[in-house]
Image (spheres, rainbow, N blue to C red):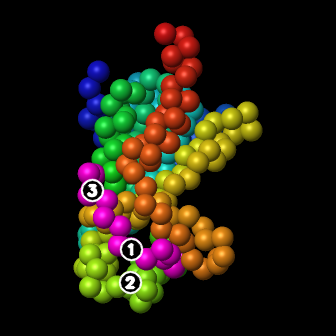
Amino acid sequence: MATNTDVLVLTPQQWDYLVRALIAPPQAAPSEMEIQESGLIDQGVFSGDSPAPEILPTVEGIVSSQMRIELRNVDLQDDVPIRNVTFWVGPTSTTIVRPLPDGIHVYGCQAEELPQILLHHLPLQPKPYVDDAPQVMPMTILEGASNGEVEGIERGVKELQFVTDPHSAFGEFMEHNLWRLSLAHIELLGSQGWELAAQLYLFSVPTCLYSCEQSPTSEDEVLLKKVANSEVWAGISSCLFESLRPRLAHS
């Protein structure tokens, strides 16, 4: 079955109502009046106080989700320097949520399509793996990215340039913002709710990919460790397999 090309574009309030209607306890679900006033019925997203049947394939991943992957990509050359995307991964389908300037975009895909779509959002392009980066970078960059503060990220980049050889390829990449930072949080649904299963911070330049790991000697620094694409994907794939296990057990 092809990727669901019907994209819902919602306001933050509409998105909140939709999620609550799908998975919240009855007492926390939005009222029909709230839904009506939000415009969701006029848009065809709801029928009365329930999501319309036509949108159920798009949001099936939210209802059946066993895993959530939250990605934040930082690219200062992008018109939108911080982009977020969340994957609600169920056994047979995934719902993908992307906040964009015109609203929150919601669309769905089938399980077999998820790896290709996920790869599109990760910095795992082929690289020659030439490592000439400094061993550490300032925590300021990660803190700015985690808080969604572009100014904080830019301050961290300037700090990193102070410890980088300006004549190196890495120095050139920093000078011209030819880098990308990706923050990934993977949560699994357990008996007590959503639990953090893994987190991964990746710093990518055209010649190399690095994992960002807390320095054991300084809270203000992050270690840059060269990492292979295959190693990163193997870790993510193991989590994907866990989310598909219920489906495989019944196939």
Relative to 54, does residue 30 appear above or below in the rendering? below
Q: Residue furthest top?
A: 251
Query: Which is more N-terminal, label 3 or label 1?
Result: 3
Query: Which is more N-terminal, label 3 or label 2?
Result: 3
Q: Which of 31 and 210 lies nearest the eye of the viewer? A: 210
Query: Which span is picked out in magenta?
Result: 125-139
Work out how far the residue at label 2 is from the one at label 3, CA to CA, in angstroms.
Answer: 20 Å
Relative to 102, does residue 68 appear above or below in the rendering? above
Badge 2 amino acid:
Thr
Mark 1, residue position? 133
Residue 227's x, y, as percent?
43, 55
Work out how far the residue at label 1 is from the one at label 2, CA to CA, in angstroms.
Answer: 7 Å
Quadrant assignment for the N terminus: top left
Mark 3, residue position? 127
State if disc 2 and disc 1 touch (CB < 8 Å): yes
At label 3, counting other C-alpha atoms closer than 10 Å, the crowd grade (few under 14, some 14-19, many 20 or more) is some
Assign a secondary structure to mark 1: loop
What mark, if any, has residue 90 been given in the picture? none
State if disc 3 and disc 2 touch (CB < 8 Å): no
Q: Residue furthest right?
A: 192
Residue positioned 53% across, 69% down in the render: 223
Query: In the image, is 166 to the left or to the right of 249?
Result: left
Residue positioned 35% across, 73% down in the render: 132
Relative to 42, does residue 104 appear above or below in the rendering? below
